[in-house]
Amino acid sequence: MNLRAAILIALMSLFAPFLADTSQAADGPTISLRSDSAYVLVRVAGKNCGFLNCFPIFPFFIRTLNADELTQAALLAREDPDHWKDNVGPNVVVPSADQPLEENGSERLYLLSLAPGTYILGGLAIPNLVIASFCMGTVKFEAKPGTITDLGTIVTTRDDRPTAVPELSNYVTGKTLGDGIAPYAAAILRTGVTDLPIALRSLPVVSADYRAVSAFPNYVGAPLMRLAPLVGVLAYGSDGRVVDPKP
Amino acid sequence: MGARLAGIGHRAHLLTRVAFPAAALVFCMTAHRASAETSTTFQPLSRPDIASITTPKLETTSSDEYFFFNKVGTTYEGAFSDLDECRIYSLQARVATTAAIPRFVPLGSTAVRSEEVTPSSMFIATFGPIGLFVAAPFVHSAERDAADAADRRCMMYKGYKRFGTTRKIWEEIAAGTETETLARLALIASGPQPLTGAVGP
């Protein structure tokens, strides 16, 4: 990270708005599920460290929109170009970084409540700011009502340096591309449902059924990245296009 | 596209003293106005006929600042499409530090750039116009870095290698319209791969 970017991070993190759209279960004696809500369980490993501080890294999820929702958003944008995004229903979900269900070193476990639907793993964020957009390849999953969908573990590391993280050691670029901010790479580990916290073991938990998602516009404008290949789910051709191995 | 159109380093002394503060003030005013705009749609460029494109005689160097791309086995049409897609991605890139977490993403719509929060609007809201004046050099540089990085990473993902060249050759490639520049880069990208001058992703 260059000095200018570091100065900007320090300044912007002071006042950037926090726009989360979710409720989250922190550590507690019991957890009950609502039948009309979906739930996501995700472990995240990795931190973003600058000159002054280290921030937890977490994923953000984008709910896919149906045609009616897109039409409605377009109408609102035409009617009120300056404030339409204040009036449209949110579809981005992020964990509250300071409320993990469990924390073990740099690994944190989050349980999120969200609207049922199909979500894509949109990228990575630190509190208030997006640091990676997986707009050139990622995965999606279904979050069903009354059920906890286990996303496994998302491991993250800087992309501009060699890494000892096994899942990413052959994937990171290992050098800077001139980025103003350190880019971050991520991979998904399918940890399954075997290492659940005790509080969740009596609840309905299913492993995420991931599907590949092709490149899409960088709506967020964050550093352009893509999720590391996921065996049997996500691959990339020599032309960079997403390959979906599933039938 | 390709190398940034930098080269202002040789004139930095004069720019720093006189021109840059003035430009920064203009930037403060225009950037804040841009923050009130709604999303922008980026359209692909029309590919020129290959017969109408001429390229300079290439020379490779170890330059990391002036460069072109090449990929064995690609066609002019394919390279133009790839370069154009990465051009749009670079236009969508924002300063990473100001890419605030959005509450709504129009997933499924055409390529747009969110203008919810810009560096200038946030600095003005917090520190006033003077604050933005002070921060403008950092913001402008960081935005340019973000666009360059998006372009290079996009082309890397698409399997292109990068080759350094001279400033003079780069200026010949970059002459004319954006479409003409892209067409020259596409013709070069689909031509014979240089034996030297590979500078990594």
Image (spheres, rainbow, N blue to C red):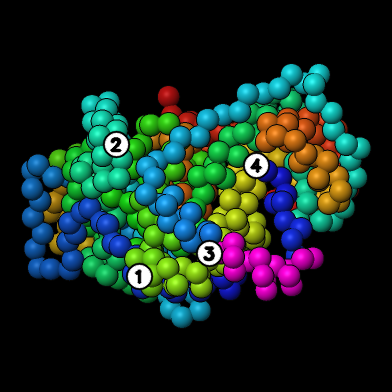
Q: Mark 3 and mark 4: span between their CA atoms? A: 34 Å
Q: Is residue B136 above or below residue B186?
A: below
Label ID, residue B25? 3
Q: Is residue A185 visible?
A: no
Which residues make up the magenta segment?
B10-24
Amino acid tagged 3: Leu
- Residue A1 shown in magenta: no
Rounded to the nearest angstrom, the CA distance separating label 2 from label 1 is 26 Å
User: What SS does tag 1 mark?
Assistant: helix
Residue drawn at (48%, 30%) of the image:
A245
Looking at the rendered image, the disc whose residue lies closer to the viewer, 3 or 4, is 3
Label 2 neighbour load within 10 Å: few <14, some 14-19, many 20+: some
Image-based side of B153 in relation to A233, left or right: right
Q: Mark 1 highlights which residue?
A: B126
Q: Provide the residue designation for mark 4.
A: B155
Q: Residue at x 63, y 38 (%)?
A: B158
